[in-house]
Amino acid sequence: MNVLLISADQWRADCLGCEAGLPVRTPAIDAFAGDAVRFRRHFAQATPCGPSRASLLTGLYAFNHRSIGNGTPLDARHLTLAQIARRHGMRPLLFGYSDTSIDPRSVPAGDPRLLTYEGVAPGFEPACMLLEDGEPWLEHLAERGYGRLTVDEVYATPLGAPALFAGEDSETAFLTDRFLDFLDRPGSDPWFAHLSYIKPHPPWVAAAPYNSMYERSGLPGPRRAPTIADEAARHPYLAWLLDQKFSGWMGRTFDRPAALDEAVVAELRAVYLGLVSELDHQLGRVLQALARTGLLERTLVLLTADHGEMLGDHWLLGKNGFWPEAFHVPLIVRHPTRQRPGHVVDAFSEHVDLMPTILGALGLPIPRQCDGHDLSEFLTGQNPANWRRAAVYEHDFRDLEHGRHRQLAGVDDNAACLVARRSADRLYVQFAGLEAGCWGEAAGGGRTPQTDPAVLLDEAQALLRHRLTKAERRLTGCLLTPEGVLGGYDPL
């Protein structure tokens, strides 16, 4: 069986046509979901990109893999999904990027991989690398007559205006073309591919017609307090976060959270949804190619995102913070032989479940390393016993370059972190250096503070139990005795 793991960057769960969320049109993905299994409560383990992908590719919670920031090394002892597949004779290919920071102990001083967080996850072979500099795509644009441009120049178009490139020449289209080229080449079967798209991650610049596909006045407004001051009053961390200037393209375009009035949010949401619709079109090409060649019936396909996007909710953009919009992402899984087509799963699933699910489908042993569980029972419509009742995710907000987190009283480098537990009706957030926060999740979308000590204690104990049962376990089930080694362990 082949494996195709597809991820989109910064794609939140309610931006999917078959969901009752933002009014986005995704006909190809909707059709795919009707022939697959959709997980409605799927959560990434961490933000930003590097930590989230580390969890997805190792099956480990961030408190176990500890690659907690873009640029924080991933410990070489943590085996990736690709490494395990390679050990069993597969050749995992990467189309796009994985944002995996190399362990500096595993390479000599001066190795160029020590100068970037955009490394390749161990075990993957780059088939088409598409990093922040966009080099192969920019070369393609030059060949197509657009001139020799930088990424900043390509994306210099004002918010809402059409991109200077045509839709068939976008980054999303370019990566899709490279993957379709791979499918057209004779090669070994089975294959393993990770197709990793950058969009709808900023810059939010879309080619025509996607830039104007959505009427601004018809979009729902952001979910937030009436004023930014009211939002900041919810928690000291939020007050600090809402006072920070955005970085990169978002900083140049929006400056800071206070600039996110209703009109600006409507504009950026319209472009974002256009980029999602463009992604849908390109994924439709991939799925059609798989079906046309007969590969779909012998390929495990998983479609998800590394993390979500705030889109102006709570006066925020990006993925910093603790609100679920930054962590709740789509997950659609199609197993060629073992599934109930069109089934929708309401149980909580997490990125740590994807590695054991893929290995299980391939008939490979699932290492003790994995914190998650095989989702295969859900694929056939069953409900596994004693399944989790909440999702747990983390965010580390230490800023080692500028030290901005130290502006918060009581927050040093090791205390600049939080862990959240999102259940069906509550969001509980535990900080290392700040007071905890808890909000009730109402059916209509409202979030009300929960201050009952009994409620807070119950949530804190649930998180503590989670931490205790998910602590590193690769050797804890092993015992050396005079009679020999009892139990088991993961090989090195």
Image: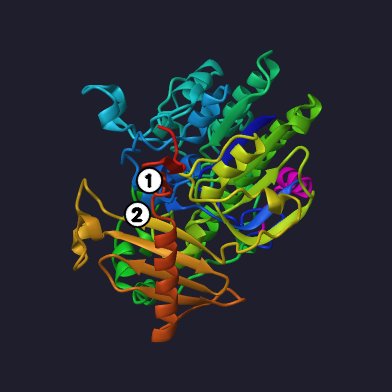
In the rendered view of the protein, which quadrant contains the N terminus?
top right
Q: Please state the horizontal and vertical placement of residue 67, each as a whole percent of the image.
A: 35, 44
On the rendered structure, is 92 left or right of 294? left
Are the residues tagged 2 and 1 within 8 Å (C-beta)? no
Q: Within the image, what quadrant is residue 303 found in?
A: top right
- Stretch of the chain drawn in magenta: 23-35
In the image, what residue occupies the spot 25% across and 51% down? Answer: 399
- Whether residue 316 is visible here, answered yes or no, is no
Q: Main secondary structure of the magenta part?
A: helix
In the image, what residue occupies the spot 31% across and 67% down? Answer: 237
Q: Within the image, what quadrant is residue 18 found in?
A: bottom right
- The residue that mark 1 highlights is 65
| Mark pair 2, 1: CA separation | 33 Å
- Whether residue 422 is visible here, answered yes or no, is yes
420 or 198, nearer to the observer: 420
In the rendered view of the protein, which quadrant contains the C terminus?
top left
Disc ID at residue 1? none
Amino acid carrying mark 1 in the image: His
- The residue that mark 2 highlights is 255
Amino acid carrying mark 2 in the image: Asp
